[in-house]
């Protein structure tokens, strides 16, 4: 019954309803675009790997040349991997593009040359075939390639017969030995992997590799960094490592999104400020509406509605309006995210997922509930206050007694008219009697 009453009340306040829903659609869609399209995809979604909190990026910095990241030299990496005591595994990669030819024609494809243990570090298991073996990483070994799931489905239609086929990369024959989950494209945005096959002597002094490591369980990043610094100082003394170079260790997500964190947080703060302004505007509209309904609320009080019931009624109206605005804002937010992503460069990290998830649904519910309370609580308490009760009841009393008094006056007039009619009828009969006697 209360909901039916609310729906009817909306019909008498179309302007207020439209303004209310406009504010809700406006700022809710902005919040949804920011949360779903940027903040959730960048900072809150976990990486598509087992225990992603243990994954780190390792690198080398050179303060003398004002370089925060120099990349890794293969001899330094080899020594770190063999001698450290804090990492479960360490691997390196070098992004590269290949001209792929074979069945289906020729195309340019983005790939990566990786050390044989890269999939182990990321915690990826082959969907088809096998992973690289240590002997695949040796110079002179047969050339093999691993595909990512997406590229396998696109190029080979997810055909298992693609395994053991030969393709040509830059005119060199490679045998397909496995297919990895799409998370493999996290490495340099690659759609296929080939073995790194670097030689220690030939790679000395060349800084070109990207390093990924997995910490041992319970090892803190500070402890692992101290371990690498110890090893690197020894390498400087022995000669492979360059002077004035120092290890760098960061969480994978921090490294990938660190530069965008500050501006995105500032943008989030500005949208939250817009939220508060919109809530204040809506609260003003709701307060004006509740005050204009003094007679109606007074009647409800007169027939027995208590303060709590009136407050619940007004909060219910605010919540239902917030739900309508939230649904509209969510639709606009989903559409706005698609528009934004369509303008983003293609080199956006493939591991970032901007689809709606449970976290987004909870955010929508929280936004709707919080704005309903922020914009509706004060007007509801204001209209349901003790002072307002007296005013509303007086207004209801005046509106009901005036019609009663008018009805009493109208009744007296009707009675008087009836009496006059009776007198006229009696006079007519007397005149008719006299005329009959005279005749």
Image (cartoon, helix red, strand yellow):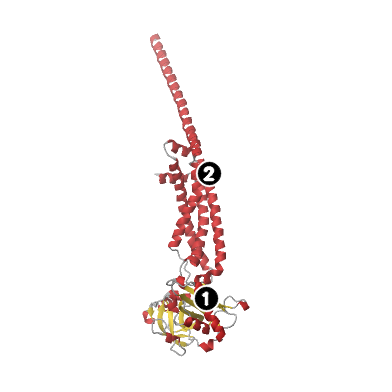
Q: Position of residue 289 (x, y in %)?
A: 51, 44
- Which residue shows up at 44% across the image and 19% down it? 420
Using the image as rendered, state which of residue 88 and residue 292 is in the foreground: 88
Using the image as rendered, state which of residue 94 and residue 71 is in the foreground: 71
Left or right: residue 365 compared with residue 343: left
Q: Is residue 343 above or below residue 382?
A: below
Mark 1–mark 2 CB contact (< 8 Å):
no
Q: Position of residue 311 (x, y in %)?
A: 46, 44
The total number of labels drawn is 2
Q: Quadrant of the C terminus?
A: top left
> For the residue labelled by badge 1, is the local secondary structure a helix, a strand or a loop?
helix
Q: Position of residue 41 (x, y in %)?
A: 49, 66
Q: Is residue 265 visible?
A: yes
**Mark 1 and mark 2: span between their CA atoms?**
64 Å
- Which residue shows up at 52% across the image and 85% down it? 75
Q: Is residue 108 visible?
A: no
Disc 2 target residue? 288
Q: Earlier in the sequence, mark 1 or mark 2?
A: 1
Q: Quadrant of the N terminus?
A: top left
* Rendering quarter of residue 150: bottom left
Q: Is residue 438 above or below residue 88?
A: above
Disc 1 target residue? 226
């Amino acid at each position: 019954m209360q909901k039916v009453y609310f729906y009817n009340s909306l019909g008498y306040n179309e302007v207020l309803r439209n303004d209310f829903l406009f504010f809700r659609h406006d700022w809710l869609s902005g919040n949804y675009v920011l949360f779903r399209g940027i903040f959730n995809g960048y900072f809150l979604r976990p990486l598509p790997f087992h225990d992603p909190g243990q994954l780190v990026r390792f690198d080398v910095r050179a303060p003398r040349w004002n370089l925060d990241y120099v990349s890794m030299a293969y001899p330094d990496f080899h020594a770190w991997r063999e001698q450290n005591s804090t990492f479960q595994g360490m691997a390196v990669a070098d992004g590269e593009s290949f001209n792929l030819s074979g069945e289906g024609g020729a195309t340019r494809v983005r790939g990566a040359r990786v050390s044989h243990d890269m999939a182990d570090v990321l915690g990826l298991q082959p969907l088809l075939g096998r992973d690289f073996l240590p002997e695949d990483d040796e110079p002179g070994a047969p050339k093999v390639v691993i595909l990512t799931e997406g590229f396998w489905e696109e190029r080979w239609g997810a055909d298992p017969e693609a395994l053991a086929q030969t393709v040509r990369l830059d005119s060199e024959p490679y045998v397909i030995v496995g297919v990895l989950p799409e998370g493999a494209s996290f490495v340099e945005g690659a759609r296929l992997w080939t073995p790194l096959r670097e030689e220690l002597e030939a790679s000395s002094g060349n800084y070109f590799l990207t390093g990924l490591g997995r910490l041992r369980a319970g090892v803190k990043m500070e402890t692992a960094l101290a371990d690498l610094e110890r090893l690197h100082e020894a390498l400087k003394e022995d000669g492979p490592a360059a002077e004035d170079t120092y290890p760098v260790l960061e969480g994978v997500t921090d490294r990938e999104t660190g530069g965008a964190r500050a501006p995105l947080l500032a943008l989030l703060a500005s949208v939250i400020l817009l939220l508060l302004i919109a809530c204040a505007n809506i609260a003003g509209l709701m307060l004006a509406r509740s005050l204009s309904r003094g007679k109606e609320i007074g009647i409800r009080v007169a027939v027995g509605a208590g303060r709590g019931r009136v407050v619940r009624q007004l909060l219910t109206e605010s919540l239902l309006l917030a739900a309508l605005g939230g649904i509209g804002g969510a639709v606009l937010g989903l559409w706005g995210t698609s528009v934004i992503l369509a303008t983003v460069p293609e080199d956006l990290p493939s591991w970032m997922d901007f689809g709606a998830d449970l976290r987004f649904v909870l955010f929508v519910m929280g936004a709707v509930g919080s704005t309903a309370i922020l914009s509706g609580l004060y007007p509801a308490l204001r209209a349901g206050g003790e002072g307002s009760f007296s005013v509303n009841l007086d207004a209801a009393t005046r509106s009901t007694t005036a019609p009663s008094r008018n009805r009493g006056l109208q009744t007296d007039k009707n009675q008087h008219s009836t009496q006059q009619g009776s007198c006229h009828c009696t006079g007519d009969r007397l005149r008719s009697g006299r005329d009959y006697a005279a005749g």
